[in-house]
Image (cartoon, rainbow, N blue to C red):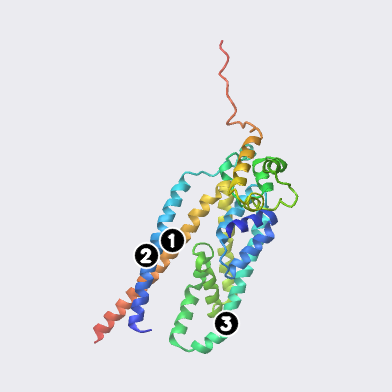
Amino acid sequence: MTPARQRVLTIGLIVVGILIIGFFGLRTLRAFREFRGHRPPPFSPAEAQQVETDVELIRDWMTIPFISKMYHVPPHVLFEALNIPPEGNQEKSLNDLNREYYPKENGIVLEKVKAAVLANQPQQIPTARSAPTFPPPAP
Amino acid sequence: MSDFLLTQIINYGEPILGAIVFIGAIGAPFPATLIVIAVGAFCRQGLLTWYTTGLIALVCVVLGDSLSYGMGYFAREPILRRFQGSERWMQAESTFNRWGGMSVFWTRFLITGIAVPVNLIAGTSDFRFRRFLIYDFFGEAIWIFGYGGLGYLFGTQWEVVSDVLSNLSGLTLGFVILAIGIWLGIRRLKKNSATADSA
């Protein structure tokens, strides 16, 4: 390799390295800030039994049976809310269902599923930590 | 792409995951790290069993890496015909033999973007397959069980973890490229000053 080419390669690597560091550095910083706001969910058996309640975690790549398992809402309830037959639609994502049954209403399936989950979530069983405490009776 | 793959995993489970990591290991641009973290979360949700899923993924990814090592190995003949005996080739081969193990290990889980080129170079150079396999196995085990474990730990919040790790991988690649550039620059400066001194 000629000295001129070596120089170009060296400068090129340094410039590309700095650009990549800048790009991913900013993204990592942003992602890390968001990450700091999250804590892993509890692992104790009682708390692990608790059902997921945050419907904002529903994504359009999820299928109805998956959402049903995640939020403990029977699948037929979700299919009914969408006005869609379960047959042949069990393995389709919300995005696919939206494209097939509501092609003119973008994102409507996701919204309907979120609303149906919210309306049909099972009652949470109170755990030891969240159980209400009563003051001792007055003497 | 990742949405489609995630839907397939929740529908068909481990076999699809195995296929994804295998094809990813031979060079298809799949978001495999994101998938591994998501699968960890699916294990926590009870959709998959962590040990069989981990084992299948590990076997498939090591097979994929071995195949891409093999591609490099069989491309060795024409490359050797062209470069064998040249000082640069021998230098490159000895450098890889010296640092190759660590390159294979770190590119399995930290700088995953260059894992396939490293496999090909390992196959093409004189790097022994058994050595490759050992470094590859341990690196991939960290990738599968470490990253998958984070997905398991964070459960439904796995997307946040995935975001941090994929950006961190890009950042590390940037530092590696910059370090190589600086190293080449310093080497060149030293060479130039040595030439000037001897003149």
Q: For the N terminus of chain B, which image quadrant?
A: bottom right
Q: Position of residue A74 (x, y in %)?
A: 71, 41
Secondary element type, mark 3:
loop
Labels 1 and 3 within one chain: yes
Q: Earlier in the sequence, mark 1 or mark 3?
A: 3
The C terminus of chain B - image quarter = bottom left
- Residue holding disc 2: A18
Chain under label 2? Answer: A
Check disc 3: other Cα within 10 Å, few if <14, some if 14-19, many if 20+. some
Q: Looking at the image, is B154 positioned above or below residue A129?
A: below
Report the Cα–Cα distance between label 2 and label 3: 33 Å
Q: Which chain letter matches label 3? A: B
Extreme residue toward the top, this view: A139
User: Does residue A72 lie above or below A60 as drawn?
Assistant: above
Residue B145 shows in this picture:
no
Amino acid type, mark 3: Ala
**For residue A32, above or below residue B183:** above
Percent across and percent down for residue B23 are 62, 67
Residue kind at label 1, given as amino acid type = Leu
Element marked by disc 2: helix
Q: Is residue A75 left or right of residue B179?
A: right
Residue A112 placed where, x, y %? Answer: 62, 42
Would residue B84 be found to the left or right of residue A114 on screen? left
Determine which residue is flagged by label 1. Answer: B171
Q: Which chain is indicated by disc 1?
A: B
Q: Quadrant of residue B138?
A: bottom right
Which residue is tagged 3? Answer: B75
